[in-house]
Amino acid sequence: MTTVPVPRGSKARSTRARKAEAPDPRFDWRRIAYNALASRALDDAEEATNRNKAAEPRENLILYQFSARGHDVAQAILGSLIDRQHDAASAYYRSRPLLIALGLSLDDAFASPLGRSGGFSDGRDIGVVCNLPNRNGPIVLPMSGDVGSQYTPAAGWAQAIQYHARTLGDASWNGSIAVVLGGEASVATNGFWSALTMATTLSLPMLFYVEDNGLGISVRGELQTPGGNIARNLASFQNLSVRDGDGCDPAESARLLADGVDHVRSGKGPALVRLTVPRLCSHSGPDNQRGYRTDEEIAADSARDPLPRLRAHLVPALLSEQEWAAIEAAVSRDVQTALAAARARPAPNPDTVHRWVYADDAPGTPEAQGGLSRAERAALDGSATPAADGDVVRFAEAVRRTLRHELDVNPKVLVFGEDVGRKGGVHLVTEGLQKQFGDTRVFDTSLSEEGIVGRAVGMAISGLMPVAEIQFRKYADPATEQLNNCGTLRWRTANRFAAPIVVRMPGGFGKDVGDPWHSLSDEVRFAHAYGWQVAIPSNAADAVGLLRSAMRSPNPTIFFEHRSLLMTSDGSARYPGDEYMIPFGSASVLRPGRDVTLVSWGALVHRCREAAERFGDRVELIDLRSIAPWDRETVLTSVERTGRCVIVHEDSLTAGFGAEIAATLAQEAFWRLDAPIARVAVNDVPMPYHTVLLEAVLPSVERIAEQIDQTLSA
Ligand SMILES: Cc1ncc(C[n+]2csc(CCOP(=O)(O)OP(=O)(O)O)c2C)c(N)n1
């Protein structure tokens, strides 16, 4: 520590105070000063750009300008502590100072808000929603626009640190940490509590850093947590080390953040640091603060500006006036150079905007950070031909065997969800897997679907292959935000990141039973979501082939396991072998036929088959197997030949996936049609409980046959 001589008398008190505040020598304060000043200068330049509304060209206007002034000094300090190869920060729109500290170039920092090419999203995402890939140093996980969604992927990364270090034995992960940043309003979100539960129950290496500026846009902190202080409220939370202090005081911020980071790095479990900071700006560019903040309040916050206090902390104790001025001059020069460079960048190329919704493995395409590498995927054997001599297995057994084999050949596979471990899943699909592979690879989770999917995302970005189970389709609702963000992740980071995960979820009617909670079959939602592959196998063999493809895919997959197939032997088939794979978007023609094409997927394929058999060789039955992507070619080719089409699905009629197929046929095969395209589906009611009601809404063999008959005679 730097020591300061203590004179006598009354002056001694103030000097003693200064001594207590001497800059902690463990920190690189020059770098901290540079980064805090750079962040402030970026905010200044952006605000000046926005004020100058007459500026040409017009795209200089930054639509989503979020200043970090007031949050900047403490973030620059925190950033200097995140320095290990596998450290990850999960952050939010006010986190640019941290990103600068972790290596974001000033050019990118300007270019992205200006929407220019390159940078963290190549003009696809707003400039404050950042990311920072780095294979050899700390990374920033792709941020999202939803407040609170940053928490659970960070917990996933923290759990992945333990997995890489302990289970895979990769020592380079030892001592790494996940750090998550959030404002005080974000502590009211589901994501915060979900991640807190994970971190504390699993003793994860995770630091929660809450930047409390007292305002969530205009809402006061007292409405986010009682009394407005989350640190005080969490003081007695089990297995959480809590610190609370003044983020305007550089010495206190440094001490508390370093303590928090040390605690987490040393393997003692998670920590939370809350620092109070002023928001020295409106919430964002368009917000003028009028109506919710008085001039006195704004002035009082201005008086708390941490930047002059940083200067006072360092000058003269560590830096001379001239040295501070030199840092300011360097910042000013660098920022102006970066602004000019960013402005000189071209606008993004519109020809590329469709790229990266899905992975693109074309030669020469850079690999995104996340998921198995191309080399790892290529090293896993696969076969498009099913084994001829497999024993007949039920649907659940087929899924179990596939999971077991993939767990066996790929140490990066993890299988988890509610009741998945000890019990083996409520449908017993994962029965026995925990015993065989241990509870670091097959495990139960806390009851939070947002946590299950967000955790999977964090794990996938770290290079693992998570297979998450959602107990029933309906219970994926709390995970909607994470599912949507996972699907767009590759696209919005312009292929810098990817999170290929598999989410298994049962749905649909059961054996003689249904209800609005356990029997939902609204798969079209996921076909409509960006970036997802959606598999809906109708039998055990297809389940094997599609699940294996999903677990080796660079894209995320929703894998539907139909309840009636889990509960009956309707989907039993010969086990096609441990290497069998089916590509997505390849339908199977189950029955050739002359006069009408019958298209279905999932459990209703079996009712379709029964109905089709009544018409001899007149009905061609196609099982789509996956609806995203779907096999347009096979359906079109068939309908062009038969001239007629009946589509059968369990999802609601209105805007069900059948509507997409019908629209495609109307557009592409109109002149070949001899009859109107027909759909047999559930007539827009939730699934009822009693069998009588259930059968009244489900497409029955009878209803399907009637429709085939009508279509044939139209
Ligand atoms: C899920 C969600 N709900 C609402 C919003 C709109 N919104 C953006 S920022 C914000 C306030 C967040 O405040 P806080 O977490 O305290 O961070 P601060 O802006 O103060 O740094 C709100 C309501 C959002 N982005 N996401």
Image: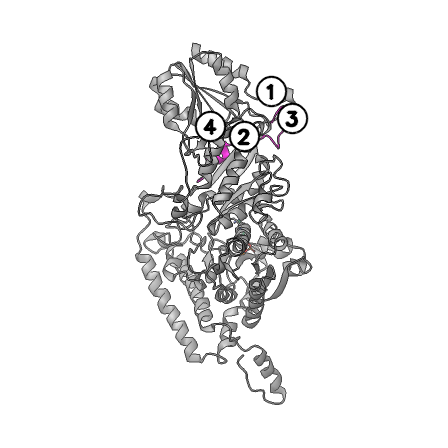
| Circle 4 or circle 2, nearest the eye | 4
| The C terminus, quarter of image | top left
Residue 515 visible? The answer is yes
| Distance (Cα) linking label 3 and label 1 | 10 Å
Q: Where is residue 453 in the image (x, y as percent from the top left)?
A: 54, 44
The image shows residue 222, relative to residue 390, as above or below, that is below
User: Disc 2 or 3, which lies upstream in sequence?
Assistant: 2
Q: Where is residue 291 in the image (x, y as percent from the top left)?
A: 56, 55
Residue 512 within the segment the image draws in magenta: yes
* Residue 674 falls left or right of residue 398: left
Task: Residue type at mark 2: give it.
Answer: Phe
**In the image, what residue occupies the spot 49% across and 41% down?**
406
Residue that mark 3 sits on: 689
Q: In which quarter of the image is the N terminus?
A: bottom right
Q: Identify the residue at the far bottom of this view.
A: 8
Measured in 3D between alpha carbons, the distance from the residue under mark 4 to the one under mark 3, in whole angstroms, is 40 Å
Disc 2 to disc 1, how far (Cα)? 23 Å
User: Which amino acid type is marked by label 3?
Assistant: Tyr
Q: What element carries label 3?
A: loop
Q: Name the residue under label 1.
A: 695
Check mark 4 vs ligand 1: CB closer than 8 Å? yes or no: no
Is tag 4's residue or tag 1's residue first in the polypeptide sequence? 4
Q: Please tell me how crowded label 4 is: few (under 14), some (14-19), or many (20+) other residues with Cα within 10 Å.
A: few
Look at mark 4 in the image and give the residue it sits on: 389
Q: Distance between the residues labelled 4 and 2?
A: 17 Å
- Foreground: disc 2 or disc 1: 2
Q: Is residue 34 magenta?
A: no
- Mark 1 or mark 2, which is nearer the start of the sequence? 2
Residue placed most toward the observer, 196 or 327: 196
- The residue carrying pointer 1 sits among few (fewer than 14), some (14 to 19) or many (20 or more) residues within 10 Å by Cα, namely some
